[in-house]
Amino acid sequence: MIPTLRVARPTNNLAALRHFYMEGLGLQELYAFIGHEEFDGIMLGYPQAPYHLEFTQQAHHQVPPAPTPENLLVFYLPEPEAWQAAVSRMEAAGYQAVPAHNTYWDRLGRTFEDPDGYRVVLQQAAWSL
């Protein structure tokens, strides 16, 4: 059995993150909640994928900035057409690629920064160990 992975992260910018990850990255809203013990949140991903991202915003609480240029989510897209479509979708949503801190990611990918400063790499390669 393969476990499901949830990456959970607090934010001060829930609406901006929803736009970045849904309109830009193309993830789907799997679940959303408002006022759950002072938290609002969204879970984004693909219905059949064994992972999803959760972003939460707590009422009356400021999340301190935490990211560095090496806090990455990497999506491997081996098919050139799918990779180009993903990059084009990010650009059409108003996001421009940023230079990767580790130049390895610039060779076959494009790096985009979300509204909280965390980075997402669209890597035009198959994942392998």
Image (cartoon, rainbow, N blue to C red):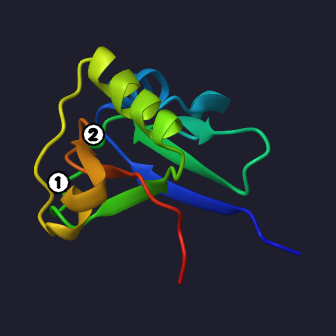
Residue on which disc 1 sits: 65
Q: Quadrant of residue 94?
A: top left
Type of amino acid under label 2: Asp
The reply, left or right, for residue 128 in relation to residue 15 is right
* Residue 125 percent across, percent down from the top left: 45, 59
Q: Residue 96's x, y, as percent?
A: 18, 30
In the picture, measured across the screen, residue 125 lies left or right of residue 46, that is left
Q: Amino acid at mark 1?
A: Pro
15 with respect to 113 (left or right):
right
Q: Nearer the viewer, residue 38 or 92?
A: 92
Q: Residue 50: horizontal and vertical position, in percent? A: 73, 57
Which one is in front, 81 or 1?
Answer: 81
Q: Residue at x 53, y 59 (%)?
A: 7
Q: Secondary structure at mark 2?
A: loop
Residue placed most toward the observer, 102 or 19: 102
Question: Residue 114 got which mark?
Answer: 2
Q: Is residue 3 above or below residue 99?
A: below
- Label 1 vs 2, first from the N-terminus: 1
**Going 20% across and 57% down the picture, which residue do you hit?**
106
Residue at 59% across, 38% down: 44
Q: Is residue 30 visible?
A: yes
Q: In the rendered image, which quarter contains the N terminus? A: bottom right
Q: Residue drawn 39% across and 49% down?
A: 10
10 Å neighbourhood of mark 1: few (<14), some, or many (≥20)?
few
Q: Which mark is residue 111?
A: none
Query: Would residue 54 appear left or right of 33 to someone viewing this image?
Result: left
Q: Residue furthest right?
A: 1
Residue 5 position, x and y percent, is: 65, 63
